[in-house]
Image: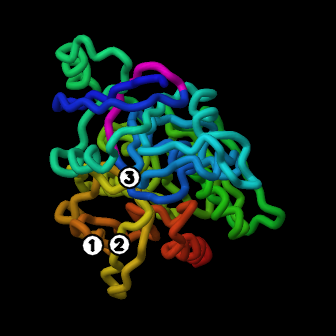
Amino acid sequence: MNTLYLVLENGKIFKGKGFGKIEETIGELVFTTAMTGYNETITDPSYYGQIVVQTFPLMGNYGTISEDFESRKPFLKGYIARDICETPSNFRSEGTLSEYLNNNNIVGLSGIDTRQLTRILRESGTMNGKITSDISNIEKIIADLKEYSVRNAVKSVSSFEKEIYRPENPKKKVVLWDFGVKLNMVRELLKRDCEVVVVPCNTKAEDIIKLNPDGIMLSNGPGDPKENTEIIDELKKLNKQKIPTFGICLGHQILALSMGAQTEKLKYGHRGANHPAKDLNTNRVYITSQNHGYAVISESLPGNARCDFINLNDNSCEGVAYLDMPAFSVQFHPEACAGPHDSNYLFDKFIGLMER
């Protein structure tokens, strides 16, 4: 057995069994309550710099499936689950979860009490952790943990060059600004006959305008939204063009910042597939997939903006409509795989904005 330890910033130590790549790693510890969709979780670029804890006890039971991956590779720093299945049973399986993590140099840890770990993160808030085989110098480990922070996140996960995806009969052209895009956003737009032009995070506003898009989608992504000052400045220029715009997750936060609103870090964030978001216009509640550690502060929204969705667990802002331009954004993931799909209609709303 490859014995590994998880050391928390507060000094708590968990002893477990390593899988995947057996080495050391430091990251920001976050937990997700999703029961399925681990292929999508481990390849979601929004987990850059983080060690992901699954609250559901068993992972890996249907293997790894490249067709379900959300990006070109995993960007997380580590992966923790109570139990890992080493003999997956699924006709689509291409290998075990442990093999996939090992091939991509990701450290895994199993056999620890993930319920206790989750309670610590809920009560104390998100903290850093280290997975290691050597705990002989705890003082040094804790000092290293206190120094660690997630930096240059968007630049580390964004694509390097423009990519174009075309359906058989394209009806609209959408520029998808890549801050750490999940590939299912591309798939949802292709289903709706949109030509999708994915552009890197460092693309200038004038270059996006030259592409003559019918609409602009601002993708999800990792890290502190306030760190992206250059992107925010370029987005301010784009806003003046009144091009139909749809922001998701980090894109939602960056759009709000470009309009003069403010964001804040949540105590332990929202990550999972069962978060209730209420539409304040219809009072309907949607069950949503979420993965974020920051939120837009509702009270900071400018006069041309309206909070349209709230999270019913903590009343944080989950969606904004802009009243003087064809733009809206949501904090949750309407493109979510493996689901839920309650809010998938928002892509049709975006198509409607472009058609009008």
The residue under label 2 is 276
Residue 125 on image: x %, y %: 20, 45
Where is residue 128? Give x, y as percent. 27, 32
Q: Please name the residue shown 20% across and 32% down the image.
A: 12
Which amino acid type corresponds to the residue marked 3 in the rendered image?
Thr
Residue 112, which numbered label?
A: none
Circle nearer the N terminus (1, 3): 3
Q: CA distance from mark 2 to mark 1?
A: 6 Å
Question: Which residue is nearer to you in this view: 277 or 221?
Answer: 277
Q: Amino acid at mark 2?
A: Pro
Question: Magenta segment, which residues?
Answer: 21-30
Q: Is residue 6 left or right of residue 204?
A: left
For image coordinates 73% across by 67% down, the residue present is: 193
Q: Quadrant of the C terminus?
A: bottom right
Q: Residue at x 62, y 35 (%)?
A: 100
Q: Which mark is residue 312?
A: 1
Question: Gap in Å between the C-alphas at discs 2 and 3?
Answer: 18 Å
Residue that numbered label 3 is attached to = 55
Does 141 sit above or below residue 70?
above
